[in-house]
Image (cartoon, rainbow, N blue to C red):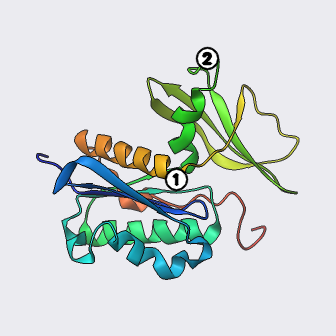
């Protein structure tokens, strides 16, 4: 794999939609935009992506990345479905990372011992905590426990940090991880990329 790849990353795990692009036509500076679309993303997703990469160039994409959650059911699903569809149709790699994994290195800097495993957690009123466990070594993040719903009385061993999405920063982290994966020739199959739903949208199953 030679030359500068054309890479696209999407993050819709909050009320904001972030999209980032590494473009071979302007390789020096990755570009990222954030839109406060909220529930309107279902109507604006394609046009938001086109604001960075016109549709006629989508066939040139070498690889994609998407934040898989946890997040709102509709917003998270929209970007994951779009990323999976593009990757399938273009037969290109797709990297999926949780939004917690994207913020883990940034949050770990607040710890006295950043190398110590820690939890990232967010409280869901009357439901419990959505939490994942991470270790960071030289800015390399290892997801020890994928984000999932924990009961209020379930203990988390070690430090617990509050989830703090910063979409502008985190979508660029996602883009960098995609670039690293591309450079390492990781396979990154689209079939394994699925959204994280800590609570079922249809209730108990």
Q: From the viewer's perspective, is residue 192 above or below residue 85?
A: above
Which residue does the image show at 83% across and 47% down from the upper left? Answer: 151
Q: Secondary structure at mark 1?
A: helix
Mark 2, Cα crowd under 10 Å, few <14 / some 14-19 / many 20+, is: few
Which residue does the image show at 33% across and 73% down from the upper left? Answer: 50
Q: Does residue 96 appear to the left or right of 38 in the view shown?
A: left
Instruction: Report the residue that reaches farthest toward the left.
Output: 2
Residue with the mark numbered 2: 113
Residue with the mark numbered 1: 167
Instruction: Report the residue that reaches farthest toward the top.
Output: 113
Mark 1, Cα crowd under 10 Å, few <14 / some 14-19 / many 20+, is: many
Instruction: Report the residue that reaches farthest toward the bottom.
Output: 43
Q: CA distance from mark 1 to mark 2?
A: 25 Å
Q: From the viewer's perspective, is residue 160 above or below residue 121?
A: above
Q: How far across and down, in percent of the image, does residue 29 sit? A: 27, 47
Q: Does residue 35 appear to the left or right of 65 in the view shown?
A: right
Q: Along the line of sight, which residue is nearer the eye, 87 or 36?
A: 36
Q: From the viewer's perspective, is residue 148 above or below residue 139?
A: below
Q: Along the line of sight, which residue is nearer the eye, 190 or 81?
A: 81
Q: Along the line of sight, which residue is nearer the eye, 41 or 32?
A: 32
Which residue does the image show at 56% across and 37% down from the upper left? Answer: 104
Q: Does residue 146 appear to the left or right of 149 in the view shown?
A: left
Q: How far across and down, in percent of the image, does residue 140 sit? A: 44, 30
Q: How far across and down, in percent of the image, does residue 105 sit? A: 52, 33
Q: Quadrant of the C terminus?
A: bottom right
Judged by depth in the image, the label closer to the viewer, 1 or 2, is 1
Label 1 vs 2, first from the N-terminus: 2
Q: Which mark is residue 112?
A: none
Q: How far across and down, in percent of the image, does residue 116 sit? A: 61, 21
Q: Secondary structure at mark 2?
A: loop
Which residue does the image show at 26% across and 61% down from the upper left? Answer: 92
């Amino acid at each position: 794999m030679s030359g500068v790849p054309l890479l696209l990353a999407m993050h819709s795990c909050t009320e904001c939609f972030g999209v980032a692009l590494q473009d071979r036509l302007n390789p020096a500076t990755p570009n990222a935009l954030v839109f406060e679309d909220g529930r309107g993303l279902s109507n604006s997703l394609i046009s938001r992506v086109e604001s960075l990469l016109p549709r006629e160039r989508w066939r040139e994409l070498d690889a994609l990345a998407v934040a898989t959650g946890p997040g709102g059911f509709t917003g998270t699903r929209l970007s994951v479905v779009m990323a999976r569809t593009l990757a399938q149709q273009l037969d290109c790699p797709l990297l999926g990372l949780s939004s917690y994994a994207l913020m883990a290195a940034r949050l770990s800097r607040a710890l006295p011992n950043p190398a110590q495993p820690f939890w990232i957690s967010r409280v869901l009123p009357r439901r419990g905590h959505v939490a994942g466990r991470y270790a960071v070594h030289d800015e390399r993040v290892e997801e020890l426990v994928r984000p999932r719903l924990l009961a209020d009385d379930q203990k988390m061993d070690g430090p617990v940090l509050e989830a703090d999405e910063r979409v502008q920063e985190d979508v660029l982290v996602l883009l960098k991880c995609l670039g690293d994966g591309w450079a390492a020739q990781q396979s990154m199959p689209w079939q394994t990329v699925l959204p994280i739903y800590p609570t079922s949208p249809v209730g108990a199953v």
